[in-house]
Amino acid sequence: MPRWLRLAIVVAIGALVVVLVLAFRRPPQDIRTGTVGKPAAAFTLQKLDGTGTLTMTPTDGKVVVINFWASWCIPCKQENPALVRVYERYRASDVVFIGVLYQDSREAGLQYVRDNGVTWPTVSDDDGRVAFAYGVFGIPETYFIGPDGIIAGRHIGPIDETTLINGIESLRAKVKR
Amino acid sequence: MSRSRIAIAVALLGIVVAVGWSARPQAETPAERVDRITSELRCVVCQGLSVRDSPSESARQMRDLVTQRVTGGRTDEQIRDEFRASYGDWVVLSPPVASWSGLVWLVPIAALIIGLAVAMRRLRAPPASLPEPPSAAVAALRERVAREEALDLPAADAR
């Protein structure tokens, strides 16, 4: 076998190993797709409690946490206590929490909100357009939007308290600067 | 030209015309366009299914979105771009060549070219020849053969 061919095979195998190592090291909660690092989509959706609409304008200088959920979603129930605690912690601050009901009926969503102590604004994405605009794969998914209106990060799957607080604080530091 | 040759020529011409006629570009209906576009998009909650083929709720919503975009006069490229903006190149079942995902096209072609190059090289290379033994060794071998022939050993061969 010629020397150049042996070298090419070694380089190809090395490249494959590097790609695999990089791919397996990435946590599945942090899969980057189209929307991370790009401007967040503004939206107006009906509130679950029927008191009108909620408009999310990402460029008003606030940190926004958007959580996509549904009442039938077991991991959403798992993460709910962490969301409740973190929301209470930042309730009086300029951090905005929005829960977006996805692929669920409003009645079931409203019952879930009442049963699980959800007190932050919740809206219903009936046709899935907002989820599509954010690049939601499945629920639960949580998006962190910075004061500059850019989607700074997202978490796929049930989120814990530490991840939520870290995500919010890293963006609040930008506001203070 | 004989009659049979003329008949064959006419038959061939007929086949060419029929194939050309059936392959002519035809105007798609909006529903056919939606089917085609959604068959090129990946269902984001499925394993290897297109948006057209998936029975999931996400795929249904995406089909509705494509239908709305087609009705609204968007081009295929604009619709695909909208999906790529949300989900990256991954969402397109045939990723664009001019991207990292395009490696799925380029790597097999590169491997094929390399393989062909190696095969051609092997075929063109002269067959490996054994090195010429030194003349002294050849002389010794000849001498030995002659000696053994002179001995005439039928008993040894029969063994």
Image (cartoon, coloured by chain):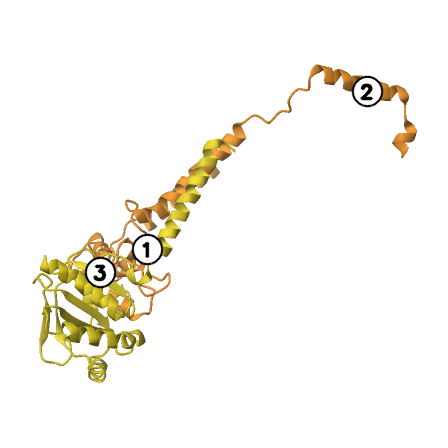
Chain colours: A yellow, B orange
Q: Position of residue B92 (x, y in %)?
A: 29, 55
Query: With B31 as the anchor, is A6 left or right in this view?
Result: right
Distance between mark 3 and mark 2 Cα atoms:
86 Å
Read off the residue under disc 3: A153
Q: Where is residue A93 in the image (x, y as percent from the top left)?
A: 10, 70
Q: Which of marks 3 and 2 is in front?
A: 3
Disc tally is 3
Disc 2 marks which amino acid? Arg
Look at the image and tell me in which quarter the N terminus of chain B lies: top left
Residue in the foreground of this view, choosing between B103 and A163: A163
Tell me the SS state at disc 3.
strand
Disc 1 marks which amino acid? Leu
Query: With B151 as the anchor, is A159 left or right in this view?
Result: left
Which label was assigned to residue B93? 1
Q: Mark 1 lies on which chain?
A: B
Read off the residue under disc 2: B144
Query: With A163 as the anchor, is A43 left or right in this view?
Result: left
Mark 3: few/some/many CA within 10 Å (<14, 14-19, 20+): some
Q: Which sits earlier in the primary sequence, circle 1 or circle 2?
A: 1
Q: Position of residue B58 (x, y in %)?
A: 28, 68
Q: Which of marks 1 and 2 is in front?
A: 2
